[in-house]
Amino acid sequence: MDKIIEDIKKCEKCELCKTRTQAVPGDGNLHAEIMFVGEAPGKNEDIKGVPFVGRAGKLLDEMLLKIGLERKDVYITNIVKCRPPENRDPTPSEKKTCSVHLDKQIEKMEPKIVVCLGRHSAGYLFEKYGIEFPGIGEAHGKSFKTESGLVLFPIYHPAAAIYNQKLKKDLEEDFQKLIEILKKTPKTGLLKDYF
């Protein structure tokens, strides 16, 4: 995993390397069975080198605490590891180029559950695993098992829930559903300590 992180920090495969302060590989437990995947770092993440440290990150931390978990219990990353200028959405080309890093992280860590934070993350991961993505509005709060046994669990991005209180309620409900999935997951590693 150290090699993957080092490769991410040195990556110059797309134009985002020219405008970033630093790449943001991920944060948390490298042996976690739950991985949270967002779309790309924002301004605060670009400065600190850690994903989800702004307002959306605070909400994510709050949601984790409500189900008895903390950042140290999970791994948090993004599809794109460098901040797009002005916090714009990453382009399809940027996602395609950068997703090789995420693929390696998933392969090395072997999480049991990947929580897709928002439509960009869910869209990429559903396509990667050959599952039709019905859209985040339809898919959020439902679990989708891949052929390899990995569970994809799409939810609304915390940033969307900050601006729309209805989505915040959905997000809270989806985290409660995540507890139920965790209870049904074979008890190994991290999860045995919690459920």
Image: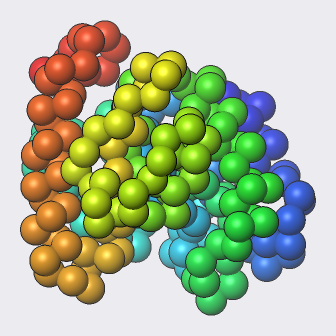
Q: Residue at x 71, y 43 (%)?
A: 101
Q: Pick the quarter of the image with the C terminus.
A: top left
Left or right: 154 as drawn, with respect to 49: left
The residue shown at (12%, 32%) is 180
Provide residue 23's location: percent of width, then percent of height.
70, 60
Please identify the quarter of the rendering in which residue 13 is found: bottom right
Residue at point 19%, 61% (across, down): 171
Position of residue 166 in the picture relative to residue 79 (left or right): left
For residue 53, side relative to residue 174 (left or right): right
Compare residues 101 and 24 and report the one nearer the observer. 101
For the residue pair 117 and 141, the one nearer the viewer reads as 141
Q: Position of residue 40 (x, y in %)?
A: 58, 65
Vertical side of 63 occupied by 36: above or below: above
Tally of numbered tags: 0
Q: Position of residue 120 (x, y in %)?
A: 52, 63
Q: Residue furthest bottom?
A: 86
Q: Which quadrant would residue 54 be assigned to in this image?
A: bottom left
Q: Quadrant of residue 106?
A: top right
Whether residue 27 is visible: no
Colour approach in the figure: rainbow
- Which residue is found at the position 14% from the left and 23% from the top? 183
Quadrant showing the N terminus? top right
Residue 187: % across, % down: 24, 11
In this rendering, the answer to whether 182 lies above or below 24 is above
Residue 18 in view of the camera: yes
